[in-house]
Image (spheres, rainbow, N blue to C red):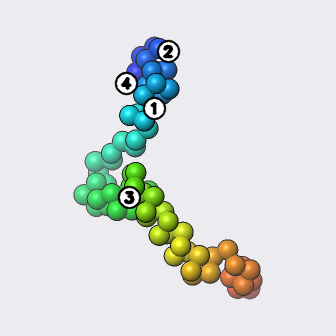
Amino acid sequence: MLCGTEAIREALVDQAEAFSDWGTVAVFEPIVQRYNVVFARGECWKDLLQFSLATVKDLGMGKHSVEEQIQE
């Protein structure tokens, strides 16, 4: 918990890297073990995001033909 404008400024500006990480959600940790896009962090998150986007694109998302099929 931060109290005062100087403490907040120091945390968010001067030490942004140290305070930019997500907190853990203890209930979900045993289930997801940081291997999903929502709760992953750092390099793991980047890798999962790239994989997810590539997979969705490979399945045809964003292509006009898929939009037509959905509308039908």
Q: Hey, which quadrant is residue 22 in on the image?
A: top left
Q: Which numbered disc flags the more N-terminal residue, 3 or 1?
A: 1
Q: Secondary structure at mark 2?
A: helix
> Which quadrant of the view contains residue 39?
bottom left
The crowding category of the residue bearing disc 1, from other C-alpha atoms within 10 Å (few below 14, some 14 to 19, many at least 20), is few
Which of the 4 image quadrants contains residue 19?
Answer: top left
Q: Amino acid at mark 4?
A: Met
The disc labelled 1 sits on which kind of residue? Answer: Ala
Q: Which residue is mark 1?
A: 16
Inter-mark Cα distance, 3 to 1: 20 Å
Left or right, 64 with respect to 54, comes to right
Q: Viewed as shown, does residue 4 lie left or right of 69?
A: left
Decide which of 43, 57 is in the foreground and name it: 43
Q: Secondary structure at mark 3?
A: helix
Q: Earlier in the sequence, mark 4 or mark 3?
A: 4
Which quarter shows the C terminus? Answer: bottom right
Mark 3 Cα within 10 Å, few/some/many (few <14, many 20+)? some
Q: Give the spatial CA distance, label 2 vs label 4.
A: 12 Å
Q: Do the CB atoms of the residues marked 2 and 4 lie less than 8 Å apart?
A: no
- Residues 27 and 16: in front is 16
User: What's under tag 2, amino acid-wise?
Assistant: Thr
Q: Position of residue 38 (x, y in %)?
A: 44, 56
Residue drawn at the location 38% of the way across and 58% of the way down:
44
Label ID, residue 5: 2
In terms of secondary structure, where does tag 4 sit? loop
Residue at the spot of label 3: 44
Q: In the image, what residue occupies the spot 50% across and 65% down?
A: 50
Q: What residue is disc 4 on?
A: 1
Question: Residue 58's spot in the image, x, y percent?
Answer: 56, 80
